[in-house]
Image (cartoon, helix red, strand yellow):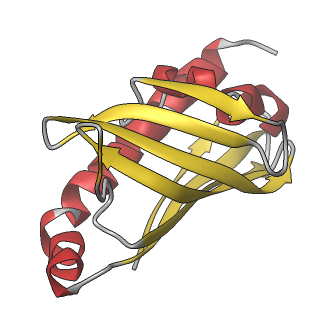
Amino acid sequence: MEFVESRRIAASPERIWPWIDNVSRWSEWFTEAERGEVLSGSGLGRRQRMFGLARGKATEIDSVVTAYEPPHLLRWHHEAERVDGRPGPVVFARDAVAEVIIKPDGDGSRVTYRLTTQPGNPLYWLLLRFAARGPIHASFKTSLNRLAALAEDAGP
């Protein structure tokens, strides 16, 4: 199952990239992130952790960067998810990959946020398909709007 939102931002990929690449800045634009940290490494293979809230519960997602092409692509694979400190599905999936793609678009950029999931069971499939679809898309739209405000206000 795939969730995708895209938005044009009046900024170059180079101006947008620092917010995407630096996981500790995700809370500035990504609505699901309260904070983020690098666990080890940099670039391709970097291990990172995002802390947030989902359904009123504290969440943690450990991931590894699987594609790193500055300033155009960052892709990460969820390796472990915890809800209230216990192993559990944050995104209702047994496997999840997220990515941000930044492509030049005239005097700005087209930024796409994509989450690809494999539901672990029929209940998770139903939740992702019907209950979570709207909130996920709304979160992605809000996140891209926040990213646009940051990148466009950064100046040349």
Residue at the (14%, 80%) spot, across then down: 123
Which quarter of the figure is the N terminus placed in? bottom left
Going by the picture, which residue comes out furthest to the bottom? 122
Q: Position of residue 5 (x, y in %)?
A: 46, 58
Which quarter of the figure is the C terminus placed in? top right
Q: Position of residue 111 (x, y in %)?
A: 63, 49
Residue at the (49%, 35%) spot, across then down: 50
Residue at the (30%, 59%) spot, across then down: 89
On screen, 33 above or below 123? above
On screen, 31 above or below 71? above
Residue 101, by quadrant, is: bottom right
Closest to the observer: 116 or 86?
Answer: 86
> Across the whole image, how many numbered discs are drawn on residues?
0
Going by the picture, which residue comes out furthest to the front? 86
On screen, 22 above or below 7? above
In the figure, is residue 19 to the left or right of 27? right
In the figure, is residue 55 to the left or right of 79? left
Q: Position of residue 12 (x, y in %)?
A: 79, 34
Residue at the (53%, 61%) spot, across then down: 114
- Asked if residue 11 shows in the view, the reply is no
Residue 124, by quadrant, is: bottom left
Q: Position of residue 131 (x, y in %)?
A: 12, 66
Closest to the observer: 38 or 145?
Answer: 38
Residue 3, by quadrant, is: bottom left
- Asked if residue 78 shows in the view, the reply is yes
On screen, 6 above or below 71? below
